[in-house]
Amino acid sequence: MKSASLLSLSLLAASCFADLEPITAEATVDAPVAEVWRAWTTSKGAEAWMVAHAEIEMKVGGIWRTHYSKDGRIGDPGTIENELLAFDPERMFAIRIKKVPERFPFKSAFRDMWTVVYLDPVGTDRTKVTVRGMGFKDDEESKKMRAFFEAGNKYELDVLVKHFERK
């Protein structure tokens, strides 16, 4: 009886902290995979379309420091730090937020999530980009952060598509 109660309690606790479905955003970019890869994974590439400032360390365990504000600088309170968890060159990379900017509203929920970006060739000159955010929990802060990233990832891919349309 005691072990059945403990099992029930464990299952209930696990369900309270269960991950919600991943969020997914997709877009097809008018550029070959190699160009899209560089746009995401190099400082110069990220600064061309995504952020005002970037320092990208492309190695497992490497830190990606970015800043969206032109008036900011890497290392100030507005800096975002992501850790590179894994990558397969020109195919995918996975990052996890290591340090959020000072004004980021989700002070706890970010610790459970990570993002995987997949690049798939569509012919020789186009690339399908899929961004998947995972690790969202069922608590209120995580749900709000999930909505934030759902909209943000879609916006980011729209900007990436437009960046390559101009070329």
Image (spheres, rainbow, N blue to C red):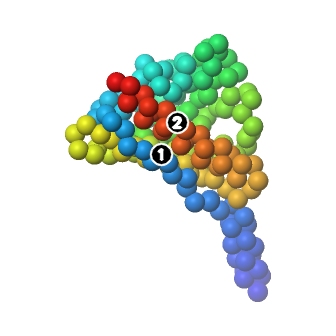
Q: Residues within 10 Å of mark 2 (few under 14, many from 20)?
A: some
Where residue 65 appears, as percent x and y from the top left, is 55, 24
Badge 1 amino acid: Val
Vertical order, 135 against 123 (above or below): below
Instruction: Identify residue for label 2.
Output: 156
Q: Identify the residue at the far bottom of this view.
A: 1
The structure residue drawn at horizontal position 61% and vertical position 34%, both measured from the top left corner, is 98
Between residue 45 and residue 31, name the one nearer to us. Answer: 31
The structure residue drawn at horizontal position 33% and vertical position 36%, both measured from the top left corner, is 30
Q: Quadrant of the N terminus?
A: bottom right
Instruction: Identify residue for label 1.
Output: 131
Badge 2 amino acid: Glu
Q: Quadrant of residue 99?
A: top right
The structure residue drawn at horizontal position 22% and vertical position 39%, both measured from the top left corner, is 124
Between residue 32 and residue 102, name the one nearer to us. Answer: 32
- What SS does tag 1 mark? strand
* Disc with the residue nearer the chain's start (2 vs 1): 1
Where residue 163 appears, as percent x and y from the top left, is 42, 28
| Residues at marks 2 and 1, CA–CA distance in whole angstroms | 10 Å
* In contact (CB < 8 Å): disc 2 and disc 1: yes
Is any atom of residue 41 visible in this view?
Answer: no
State how many labels appear. 2
Where residue 158 appears, as percent x and y from the top left, is 49, 37
Where residue 164 appears, as percent x and y from the top left, is 38, 29
The structure residue drawn at horizontal position 61% and vertical position 28%, both measured from the top left corner, is 80
